[in-house]
Image (cartoon, helix red, strand yellow):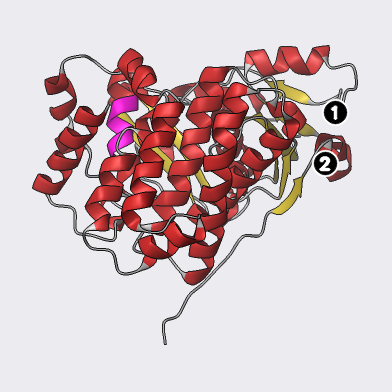
Amino acid sequence: MTLHTFHCPTRLHLGRDARHRVPDLLRGRTLIVCTPGQWARLQADAEPWWPREAAVFAEVTPNPDLDALDVAADALRGQGIEGVLAIGGGSAMDAGKALAAMLGTGGSLHRWFRAGEPIPEAGWLPVVAVATTAGTGSEVTPFATIWDTARMRKRSLSGPAAFPAEAVVDPVLMASMPPAVTRSTGLDALNQALESVWSREATPWTEALAARAVALAMEALPQVLERPHDLGARHRMAEASVLAGVCIAQTRTALCHAISYPLTLHFGTPHGLACAFSMQAVWSACAGADDGRLSRLARATGHGSVEAFGSALAELLERCGLSEALAESLPQDHAAVLALVGEMHAPGRSDNLMVPVTEAVLAEVVKRSLALS
């Protein structure tokens, strides 16, 4: 018999107006971590649900930078901070987790990632993660992505201590997302669910959760793009995102994410678009070696076969405008993308696919993705 494990210690609060539970979840002096835009929206909120006496780091940028976070941690030390309230999308969550790690342990990203010191497995400050996008699932994962821009590398903080203590997911906070952010984060959620299915670490539990996440995302994503203030659709998309996050917390991501990192580093391609870039091609690569999991997903999502699901996926991506979005964020010269194939072998990602990934397989997936996009 196969041994499976499942671990998700984050307590989830999902539903309309869940944000009003936040004050009851905080303990001690809190650090709010968010983007400048989110901070402005918080201050304009007619019904404040965040602590007014908190310390604030409202300088989160897309793809949080290692050096900038080290500077922020140094400035915040000595302020008696006992917990972190991260509000926003994946970048705010990642920055919040990194600051919780540094402020709780006294360490720094520079020492951990550049000097090679071990990352402490305990002592991190507790994080309450409030999601304002439906995409990364970072509110329920033990990962934080940090971008070492100076060295053109993606770094990852991971481990049980990186799980937020509490996750608050309120679709009301998502209704104001711009279409581009809705598309990118929604595609990220769908991709994470699929990555967990074709992961080498997939289990019957993650398969079942991923099937629901995929079904919800394929239904809700076009709806929220067409009707941004449809709170029912926003709720379904939020549920899909949380489920996908729970799945990758167990399985990790795979080849699509490995391919995405150089696209974001070199071309600034938004993370969700960069992951969706290769989604169809990876599905096709796995379909030829299906051990039953893709067929089960197809049936569970209302499609009769692996081929039928692949067609439905292609139709969804077209309806969501993926090709047009990629055309704006990737170079027209395909050679510039193909030149990055050597950087797309990310340990723990490209080798987490259900089929072996050789240099030739990877190059073919990228070529096919370019043709499709």
**Crowding at mark 1 (Cα within 10 Å: few <14, some 14-19, many 20+):** some
- Which quadrant would residue 134 be assigned to in this image? top right
- Which quadrant would residue 177 be assigned to in this image? top right
| Left or right: 173, with 304 as reference point | right
Vertical placement of 237 versus 193: above or below?
Answer: above
* Residue for point 17% across, 44% down: 362
| Residue that label 2 marks | 26
Is 9 covered by the magenta stretch?
no
Provide residue 299's location: percent of width, then percent of height. Answer: 46, 61
Amino acid type of the residue tagged 1 in the rendering: Pro
| Left or right: 137, with 198 as reference point | right
**Crowding at mark 2 (Cα within 10 Å: few <14, some 14-19, many 20+):** some
* Residue for point 53% across, 38% down: 136
Residue 265 seen by the camera: yes
Q: Quadrant of the C terminus?
A: top left
Residue at the far left in the pictured view:
360
- Which quadrant would residue 112 be assigned to in this image? top left
Provide residue 234's location: percent of width, then percent of height. Answer: 68, 34
**Which of 167 and 98 lies nearest the eye of the viewer?**
167
Residue 71 seen by the camera: no
Q: Quadrant of the N terminus?
A: bottom left
Identify the secondary structure beneath mark 1. loop
Q: Range of the magenta residues? A: 259-264
Sequence-wise, the earlier of marks 1 and 2 is: 2
| Residue that label 1 marks | 51
| Left or right: 170, with 53 as reference point | left
Distance, label 1 to label 2, CA atoms, is 9 Å
* Mark 1–mark 2 CB contact (< 8 Å): yes
Amino acid type of the residue tagged 2 in the rendering: Leu
Marker disc for residue 67: none
Vertical placement of 55 versus 115: above or below?
Answer: above
